[in-house]
Image: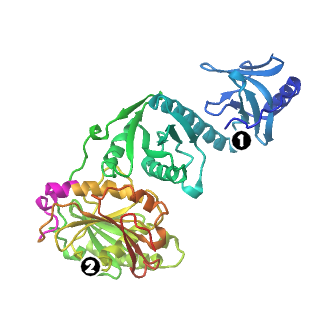
Amino acid sequence: MAKPRRPVAPAAAESLEEAIRAFAARCRRPLVQEPGEEAIPLLAGRHEFGRSAGKLLLSAWDDVRNWNRRVVNVAHHQTGRLTLVIEKFGGRQAEAWIFDGDRPEALEWDRHGDRMIVREQFRRMLRRSFLGWELDDLTTERDLEHTLSANYPRALVRQGKRAWAAILAPPEAPHALSFGLIWLDYVRRRRQPKITVEGLALFLPAHETQATALRLRWLDPAKAAFALYAYSPEGDAVRLDPADCGNLQTALDRCQHSILALPDWVAQLAGWPHVERVSLAGGVASFRVFGLEFARWREGELRGGFEDRRLLHPRDLPELRAIAAELAHLRQETGSLLQRRSPEAWLETRVRESLTTLDAHLCPEPVYGQVPAMAGVERGIADLLAIERSGRLVVLEIKATEDLHLPLQALDYWMRVAWHAAAGDFAACGYFPGHAVATLRPRLLLVAPALEFHPTTETILGFFSSDVPVERLGVGLEWRQQLRLLFRLYGAARPA
């Protein structure tokens, strides 16, 4: 926490010691912690009280650390936690906590303490990386109004009239670039006109840098400068050149969708009410009801059922048809669990069957999903690849619920399609037979219910390069019954 605005008057050492002892005695696992440091247990024989300059001195230690502070007063006493005003070197006052590590609230206090530790590590990285610059606004506070997360320490560094926004991604928290762009936009809007916030400095764990570097290549350098740093577990940060962080890793399998032939007894599933057949990579056929798969043909076998899949034969079709009918009924039942399950899959079904409603330039078929596949990535977004009558490819990213990471996750997929398109891979691998597939960059369509685009979508898209032709398509809220296009916005344009 921040330094108290006014110095706190010291309390008597004897009364403070009595209060701390009494509180610790009521704790099952008493811990002492200073913001930015790890908690130390107050174990018997491993902590002691003393006096220093007439004030209470509290010391605690474990096998690797020692903690010694003068205690000035008690700032706050609540169930499970005692907040102390302490005196650090130079007479500066700050806060420390004694709390019960076995209380349920302690988990949140531990999280807060962990954030303070990361914040202080970030402070040291910034001071080393921006020598001679002033550090301002270093915080981990949550700001819901401006979509600023407590998980990402953020700061502003200044030198005269120049400034940089900075953000750090803890090892367990991805998506730093989304929050970084939001932070950059925020500090630019609230800074004095005489100060120029030139760009964004991103401090990432080493394993996150390549994906972010690839994204940075498609942001507009005229909108902001970007600095990328990789930090080690020890807190050492090294600046990287995004151009030297590796190439795009992507592969395109040969298309087997168009040549997939099914036995008649399997092909008839697609004629049942509400059943959709979707061809997948590897010669797989998926049979779905409003986006939920209930049967799959793969390597000469049909396996079906809803929760439990089993090998099926022609004699099992009446039972499977009953399952499909029941699934369709439950899927359409207002308020049911099945109606709320996998909304992206259901919206994908509507988009597949209404492509020309969304864009008259699109061919209704063929349409491919997960091409190229992004191995090992859980995206939470449905993606489709279609083609215009002109031969230009079109990427459709579909999200049924609000997600601030939609623009950059869509960019991840789009850049892979763009790479294969430029190389001529789609035509070479047998995709879009009968079409002359163009090698120019594809269009990117973000499709979502009109009220489900996150408020920061325009902010993030505002940093995209004009080389990424992105559009937002807002559909009506009644999309489960009928897909209706309400608006089309280009780039970072805002609704009227």
Dot 1 falls on a residue whose secondary structure is loop
Q: Amino acid at mark 2?
A: Ala
Measure how far apart labels 1 and 2 are at the Cα level: 60 Å
| Magenta run includes residue 429 | yes
| Magenta run includes residue 49 | no
Residue 345, given in percent of the width and then of the height, sits at 38, 68
Residue 103, given in percent of the width and then of the height, sits at 71, 41
Binning the other alpha carbons within 10 Å of mark 2 as few (below 14), some (14 to 19) or many (20 upward) gives few
The main secondary structure of the magenta stretch is: helix
Task: Decide which of 4, 104 is in the foreground and name it.
Answer: 4
Q: Which residue is mark 1?
A: 103
Left or right relative to 14: residue 37: left
Residue 104, given in percent of the width and then of the height, sits at 69, 44
Q: Is residue 283 above or below residue 249?
A: below
Q: Residue at x 30, y 48 (%)?
A: 217
Left or right relative to 132: residue 382: left
Dot 2 falls on a residue whose secondary structure is loop
Q: Quadrant of residue 47?
A: top right
Q: Residue at x 40, y 67 (%)?
A: 493
Asked whether residue 379 is in view, the answer is no
Left or right relative to 94: residue 482: left
Residue 170, given in percent of the width and then of the height, sits at 49, 40
Which residues are the magenta region?
A: 419-433
Q: Which residue is mark 2?
A: 360
Q: Quadrant of the N terminus?
A: top right
State which tag comes first along the sequence, 1 or 2.
1
Left or right relative to 90: residue 342: left
Q: Is residue 126 above or below residue 290?
A: above
| Residue situated furthest front in the rendering | 194
